[in-house]
Image (cartoon, rainbow, N blue to C red):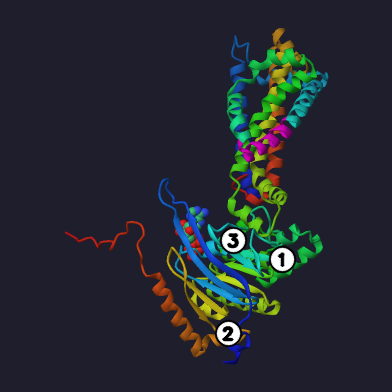
Amino acid sequence: MEERDARPAAPPYIQVHGITKRFPAALKGQALVTVLDQVETSIARGEFVVLIGPSGCGKSTLLRIMNGLIPADEGRVTIDGATVQGPAGDRGMVFQSFNLFPWRTALQNVAFGLELHGVGSQERDGRARRLLAAMGLGGFENYYPRQLSGGMQQRVGLARALAIDPEILFMDEPFGSLDAQTKLLMQDELETIVQRHKRTVVFVTHDMEEAVFLADRILIMSQRPAKIIEEVRVDLPRPRMDHMRAAPEFGELKAHIWNQVRTAQEFRPTIGAVDHPTAATHG
Amino acid sequence: MRIPGVDVRFAIIRIASTAALFTAWEWYGSQPGQFALPPPSKVFPALVESIVDGGLVQAAIGTLWVGAVGFSIAAVLGVTLGLVIANVSWADNTLTPLVNAAYAAPITMLVPIIGIYTGLGFTGKVTLVVLFAFFVILINTEAGVRQVREDLVETARSFEASRIQIARHVMLPSTMPFILNGLRLGVGRAVRGAIVAELLLLVSNLGLFLIRAGATFNMPRLMAGIFFTMLMGYAVMWFAGYLERRSLRWRGEATY
Ligand SMILES: Nc1ncnc2c1ncn2[C@@H]1O[C@H](COP(=O)(O)OP(=O)(O)OP(=O)(O)O)[C@@H](O)[C@H]1O
Ligand SMILES: [Mg+2]
């Protein structure tokens, strides 16, 4: 297909070289748990990459390492050739558990990054207001996080990351708490924003439909210790439109990914697991 | 502010219970042979008289001034040292045992030592107030820093916040409820410290008022002084609590 050849060997923008991460076990004296095992991948500028994998395999951990929030035990991440040493203001992160500042209103949360970077209050409030409106949260500017539903909090977290207009967006299940309709709207919104600004996105999800709709490429991770076991290109044209969800290729890709994920998910007991919770025999 | 019905109900309960207390007090105080605890019907005239002749108000202002100066010093020292102990491990190791020992000790026993070091005047009184209020502020501040959520620090870091920005935008607001709670408790202890200083270190102001009334067995006047002191403490604590609630509105109604 032409589209595929239109962006062939783009030079890697983000490179992940042999990333290994171990965490201390919950109990003292137990061996370290290897979460990521020699993870390799590279991402082109402007690419939308989706990470999919079983729960607990290390997707959030990989995002945090790529963004420089935590160090890896082995390997390194480079962005534009420079090794990542820590977080940077031109990279944004949407956290899986929202992480809103409870003492800040929705508006103040969204304006947080701009405030740190010294943007004047007029401009940052204006930008925060517009983003909240785009997230369907107009009118909730002065609500504190505890006064917002989970899905609303999640969208505030998304707006907060978008507010600094980052070069790279790391998004950890950013639509995980949304209802089906809002989720579709937000996917469209994200597609528009990302296409308009040609941003690079690394996006974690458990939702295959969302993965196919948004991704240029889907990386499938295995159980812990996790590796990237499969890469699937999505060659649907951009910008993605809602009607594409009905296209036969769309369904085929979804089915293919589901197959791969199911393989990755093969139940591998690591801690003394019970084979079958016995259906107790009645006497 | 609140649903009027609820407000009224609270007001009724409050007035009724206060009235019941005063009735009981009046009954007990007017028992024949009762001397140590005069009834309100004698205490309140004495209170009005003490206020009108100026002695009590002036004494209270003197006491509050000592308390305020000492409290301000204790607040600055307590918050600063609390932040340091929570962030610097050697300070924690060396100072925490001392702080715990000092917090548990009755400060009153230091009165003779303070007297020798600082003299019995204003400095001595303020020093005693500082010792009364300081530890509870320090301990609360320290506890506050220790409960700062690591994920929120990480969030700020993801925006490339500097150490100072993290301190200002994450540490400080998450520690604030604890600091304010410490300050509120500290205010109460400062008032207590000021009165103790004026009873034990150098008799003056409210201390003088109380001791003079006691020494002349003017029980209504003594009770008036005690009652006034308690009212003053209540007002100070209420005001501190009000400030605390106001600055913590983000936490909602349930946790004040
Ligand atoms: N700070 C930590 N200390 C110890 N173990 C950790 C820590 N952070 C993550 N882990 C472990 O690393 C593994 C991967 O966690 P991670 O949050 O990256 O998974 P995930 O793929 O994002 O899962 P999910 O899809 O459920 O969000 C888990 O087994 C978790 O227990
Ligand atoms: Mg995760």
Q: Which residues are magenta?
A: B74-89
Classify mark 1: residues with Cα within 10 Å, few (<14), some (14-19) or many (20+).
Answer: many
**Secondary structure beneath disc 2?**
helix
Q: Earlier in the sequence, mark 2 or mark 1?
A: 1
**Secondary structure beneath disc 1?**
loop
**Residue under mark 2: which chain is it in?**
A
Same chain check for tags 2 and 1: yes
Distance CA(mark 1)–CA(mark 3): 17 Å
Q: Are marks 2 and 1 in contact (CB under 8 Å)?
A: no
Residue A131 lies, in percent from the top left, at 70, 69
Q: Nearer the viewer, mark 2 or mark 1?
A: 1
Residue B92 lies, in percent from the top left, at 61, 34
In this figure, which residue is indicated by the disc labeled 2?
A242
Q: Earlier in the sequence, mark 3 or mark 2?
A: 3
Distance CA(mark 2)–CA(mark 1): 28 Å
In this figure, which residue is indicated by the disc labeled 1?
A164
